[in-house]
Amino acid sequence: MLQENDKILLIIFLIMLLVPLSMVLLFIIFNNRKNKLIQQQLHAQKQFERELAESQIEIREETLRNISWELHDNIGQLLTLAKIQLQNSDNNPEIIKESVGILGNALQEVRALSKSINSESLKNMGLLEAVHNEMERLERMRFLKSELKIKGTPFFIPDKEEIILFRILQESFSNVIRHSRATELKVEFMYNDTNLTIQCEDNGIGFNQDSDFEGIGLKNIKTRAKMIDAELFVNSKVNQGTKITLKKTFK
Amino acid sequence: MQNFSYIFLLIQLLACLAAIFKWKSIRKTPLWIFLPFLIYSFLNEVTTTALYSFTSINFRYLYNIYCIVSFFVYLYWFDRILKLKLWKWIVTLVFLGAVVYDVITSDSLKQLIKTALLVQAIILLIFSVIYFVRLLNKEEVVHYQLIPEFWIILGLLVFHIAFVPLFLLTGLGYNIQKAYTIAINILNYILYSSYILGFYVAGKR
């Protein structure tokens, strides 16, 4: 049998055993949490890279679709017109001069188009110029009137985030053209300290946010905004146009 | 037994030196409070060890003052890192209540303020657990080993996990002074080593 004092010493020993045990337990808990978080971060990183690659592919596909449209509806029409005029000119200097003018226009369109074919264009131009070109194209194709405003001093935006932002805007423009029946598109970039706010507003038919919000391509925009930690606000009312606001803080 | 005290003094001195060497890294953080506190702790320990070794003067009141000072140092520090808001006033009231109770019920000049010590230990234990739970829910936890607060609070948690039951055991009237002193010394080695680690990590941050 243990003496009273031995019992107490055993209790003290057991109490002191709590020290290494609590330390080991704490490190196990912290290491598990750390590993779990690292795995989550890796997963998020992979998802971001996947989304980024998808955005790049979509930008390219959209660009090719636009080129096809422009070649067929714009440059093709100009060249056809010039060809017909020249065929029927009978060496009439007036008609030839007019045809040369049409060919000059076609050449200008080809030059403008070649800018957007360059796959590295977004990297080289930057977000503002790429958006400007996109809006210019919409005007050129006579889809609608567009206006681009820039407030504040533009700052550096990392390539990856620039691609996602551009894809969000490109998708918004595409939605405007396909669904809104708008005649005007206004885009505003507001740079403030490290914050960027982008507003994209049209005067189209709008939609009922409660019923259609997820259904018309905005889901993609929402997912991508979330991916780059940007806040997205969509305001739309039937027959009162749509306004998309993106807010992003850069560290 | 004296050797245990000397080793403890040496570790305390090393913790002071670590705080001095890493002062640049800690002076603009809540950790700054530990430099004056550790110097005070060391001087207090040297004085009490000297009084114990060479005189028969009762020095318990020095430990009692240390207990009160340390409570407010830890409260300040935890308030800075946990943002205690109203809780700091509630906790202060509870602690001061315990001190007043000890002063009324015992001779605080000759005896330790045991209730206050126990209340302080339980409060620090709770704060430590709260800190770890919050840290586990932050992304910072990925680099937990590079957080100075983690190491210091680890020391505090481990110290108080064993200190509270040991302290309660001494109140039962058994003659365990020797084992108790050894255990407390070991706990102090761990606590002050965690300070040293914390300051080392603060220098790396």
Image (spheres, rainbow, N blue to C red):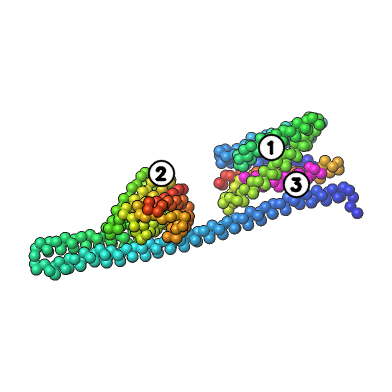
Bounds of the magenta span?
B149-169
Label 1: which residue?
B91
- Visible residue check, residue A137: no
Q: Chain of mark 3?
A: B
Query: Pointer 2 indicates a residue of which chain?
Result: A
On residue B137, the disc is none
Mark 2, other Cα within 10 Å: few <14 / some 14–19 / many ≥20: some
Magenta: main secondary structure equals helix
Query: Residue B98: in sight, yes or no?
Result: yes
- Name which residue lies at 39% across and 51% down: A243
Against A78, residue A250 (above or below) is above
Amino acid type assigned to the residue bearing label 3 in the image: Ala
Q: What amino acid is labelled 1 in the image?
A: Val
Q: Toward which corner of the image does residue B12 lie, by quadrant?
A: top right
Q: Nearer the viewer, residue A194 or A147?
A: A147
Seen in the image, is A89 located left or right of residue A191?
left
Q: Earlier in the sequence, mark 3 or mark 1?
A: 1
In magenta segment, residue B155: yes
Residue shown at 74% from the left, 39% from the top: B119
Pointer 2: what residue? A192
Asked if the residue at tag 3 contacts the one at tag 2, i.e. Cβ–Cβ closer than 8 Å, the answer is no
In this view of the protein, which residue sits in the foreground, B188 or A156? A156
Mark 3: secondary structure:
helix
